[in-house]
Image (spheres, grey):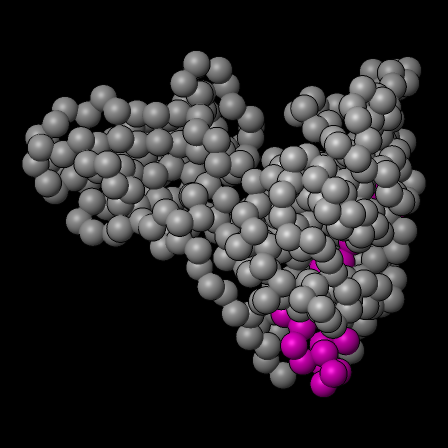
Amino acid sequence: MKRMLGIILLSIITISAISAEIIDHNCTDITQIPESAINQAKADLHIAYGHTSHGSQLTDGMSGLIDFANGGGLGLSLPTDIFAWNNGGTGGALDLHDYAMGGDCGYYPQWYDNTINYLNDPSHSDVNVIIWSWCGQVDDKYAAGTLGSEYLYPMTQLEIDYPDVSFIYMTGHVDHWDDANNKAANQMIRDYCITNDKVLYDFAAIESYDPDGTFFEFPHDNCNYYESVTGPLLGNWATEWQNSHTVNVDWYDCNSAHSEPLNANRKAYASWWLWATLAGWDPFLPVNEVVIIDKEILLSNFPNPFNPTTTISFSVTQTSSFVKLEIFNIKGQKVKTFTSFPNGSLGTREVVWNGTDDNNQPVSSGVYYYKLNVNGKTKAAKKCLLLK
């Protein structure tokens, strides 16, 4: 039975050919998600989640977030229980069926068959989002050469068979003790999702950064980090951050299988970013900003994805126009502004962006948005992907 995912757009926006949605460490600022997007997710989404122990970090974090937000953690000032969730969505909560399907996506063909059986059950006819997590098998599947045949390709087949359901891909947790296979496996999943325009929840990337954006090249799933593959243990980024910040203000205590509470906190924030995105929220535009699309046309950048430079082309058909091109990161923070366009000129223009911000500092890999502003009005917007 086909299932309709109702999407109500918060803004009118033109999107480039790159439509992959990557939910990673850049998507962990819960304060950036507007109340309207949270409510839209609760209105639109009916989610089924299959996982074992590691995957419970998402839902345990989401459970702890309810009281944390109610208490004003991170300065949040939202209606009571706005982040509530349960199976069925009763009481205005998000409809999320936890442990909906047995096992996790490391067990093939069980996870695939369980998904089909679940979706073919008439009592689940409203389900429009399927998400599976890994436990510890992603490394082994990569090493055995079966990551494609037992995960990526079956997921794509499910998308074909159930076109009205959003299927969320996921990387596995980090594993310092199988570093090479783990990194290669997770990168293979990322590359597949980017190339084929999938929605990815990047579990591993969230575990590789602390809330301040510090990157740990050799982390483990318990948040320990090491000097190198064979080097000594240097510390635990989660406990270090927790100890230097205030509980119930900057972070909250909650269950976090195999790991630390802060890890589950960030998994919960990214989960709500994912839900809001699926329901139509575009994080780089203010909620009430409407893009007026007319004769000023922002063309796709090329190449896309890119490294190290990309050329953004646009056309201006009005004389005496003040033109501004702005680039934003996925958090909606402006990183670059181009305004050096002679007024009164017509025709196609080109801007070369070299992946730096307004201070000429390199920006990190990820999705970026660029929008064209003509005479004080945003005329069109698109997104690009920087890969390093």
Q: Quadrant of residue 347?
A: top left
Q: Which residue lies at the image location 9% right of the left edge and 32% below the top edge?
A: 320
The answer to whether 287 is drawn above or below residue 183 in the figure is below
Q: Give the left or right position of residue 335, taking residue 242 as reference.
A: left
Residue 153 in view of the camera = no
Is 284 drawn above or below residue 241 in the view shown?
A: below
The answer to whether residue 31 of the structure is visible from this angle is yes
Residue at 39% x, 25% y is 336
Q: Quadrant of the C terminus?
A: top right
Depth check: give the residue in front, 153 or 166.
166
**Which image quadrant for residue 119?**
bottom right
Residue drawn 90% across and 51% down? 53
Find the magenta span and give its range: 118-139
Left or right of 313 on screen, residue 284: right
User: In this image, 83 relative to 16: left or right?
Assistant: right
Residue nearest the observer in this picture, 14 or 107: 14
Q: Position of residue 107 (x, y in %)?
A: 86, 60
Whole-percent x and y of residue 61? 79, 46
